[in-house]
Amino acid sequence: MRIYIKGIEDDRFQRPLELIANLFFEESEVVLGEKDFDADAAIVFKIGVKGSILVEASLTAKDGSVFSAMAEKEMPEGLTEKEEVKQLKTVVSRAYLQVLQDWTGIIQKWGILTGVRPTKLLHKKLREGMEQGAAHRELKEQYLISDGKIQLMQQIVDRQLAVLPDLYDLKNGVSIYIGIPFCPTKCAYCTFPAYAINGRQGSVDSFLGGLHYEIRKIGDWLKRNDLKITTVYYGGGTPTSITAEEMDMLYEEVYQSFPDVENIREVTVEAGRPDTITPEKLEVLKKWNIDRISINPQSYIQETLKAIGRHHTVEETIEKFHLAREMGMNNINMDLIIGLPGEGTEEFAHTLAEREKLMPESLTVHTLSFKRASEMTRNKAKYKVADRGEIEKMMNMAEDWTKENNYVPYYLYRQKNILGNLENVGYAFPEQESLYNIIIMEEQQTIIGLGCGASSKFIDPETGVITQFANPKDPKSYNDNFEEYADKKIEILDSLFNKAKI
């Protein structure tokens, strides 16, 4: 879909206009300034700024049909040029979204929002003292978010503050993410660091050596600077892909290196692939008092699992869940994905019915996203997925099912190229929510990433400014330079936390 824009020539508007166009069309191109006779639609903007911003948008489609929209917002005084441009982008986006909705007949329930963390926006308004009703009105009027999505946001914010009443006061602590970049096989939709572990023992050994080094270095810094750890999350890849002995040595390293381990509020291990779970590995988890794990079926349709490259069976998922429960795992999460190839409402209803037989403490309902580097994106013709309408029906089914079974939503995030422009929602029984998931989504605390592909997000305790640093995704690059990556993280930590103590 090619859209020609007249009346806006500032390149700073290119990206926001492209992101909104992508909400409506699988592939879109937005052209600013020059007349494009091959465009599927031409949109002419008229912009006025006198005390308030007034934007008119008129769309003429290739077939001659015409649609128009208008948006307005008061312009506060004393803004910098950057702040003025931001305000103008918001108003332009509103008019643009409305005229595209009229043209396509598609209503975007998230309005003009294209970012990952919508609940962070509501947290900010409420924390600044805005009354709840006023915050909701602004979300609806300025961002065009639907009432239903605003209600979901508020429900999640309320639950997060109930679970973590000190959420806004976590900046003087840290959480830890430990990335294990190995899996039994690579799933078709995946872009996480995940290398098939078979035949890679040399890489595994080298990687674990570097990871142990990083754990010791960061642990030493935390002890010297008296910083406490709130949560630890083992992700990947699949952390249970390594052997029970390797897991035991890793947890022992963490226990010896990190400060005040007994008072860490939560430790989670992703055991997402049921084919990696063994009694020996569960014994190791039990030994180190880890009882929160994820076992992720994604679907209870065997043909789907085969199509997406997951080599476990539906029966194995159920067996491993019961094994984990029998061996003391008291907080089990299980993920599902809406919109997997070949699945519609009938298949999803079956998956929900199977889930009801297990009733894990929490589940995350993902909507399939066509991630740029995934096998599924590279070969879209091979992977047929449901249309927007059916995807939304499946999301509604998930919402109804979780409510009927007493799960409550507690975190939410969105992704680029997500089917139906929907969202991923984490649900849990009350008091069984993942603290780490809340912390990473709301960006209220530094998260130090250790291991291959692990991203660190450093939050300045004084200003809240975020600094990001990522370890490389492939084991070889990590193995060659893990000392450098540990030193770089310590340099950033020094600049933030030691500054805050002066």
Image (cartoon, rainbow, N blue to C red):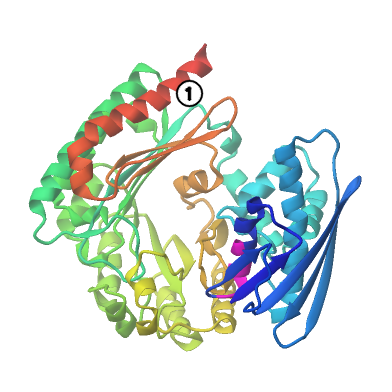
In the image, residue 176 above or below residue 53: above
Q: Residue placed at 46% from the left, 71% from the top? A: 368
Query: Which picture quadrant has residue 447?
Result: top left
Helix, strand or loop: magenta stretch: helix
Instruction: Please tell me which residue is depicted at 60% across the width and 57% down the height of the picture.
Output: 15
**Residue 271 screen position, x and y as percent:** 29, 58
Residue 416 point in image, percent of width and height: 51, 63
Depth order, front residue of 425/84: 84
Q: Is residue 100 magenta?
A: no
Tell whether 218 sits left or right of 355. Answer: left
- The residue where tag 1 is placed is 496
Magenta range: 18-25
- Viewer-nearest residue: 173 or 23: 23
- Can residue 258 be seen here? The reply is no
| Residue 30 appears anywhere in the view | yes
Give the residue furthest to the top: 502
Q: Position of residue 335 (x, y in %)?
A: 41, 65
Three-letter code, disc 1: Leu
Q: Quadrant of the N terminus?
A: bottom right
SS class of the residue under badge 1? helix
Residue 222 in the image, given as x and y percentages of width and height = 36, 24
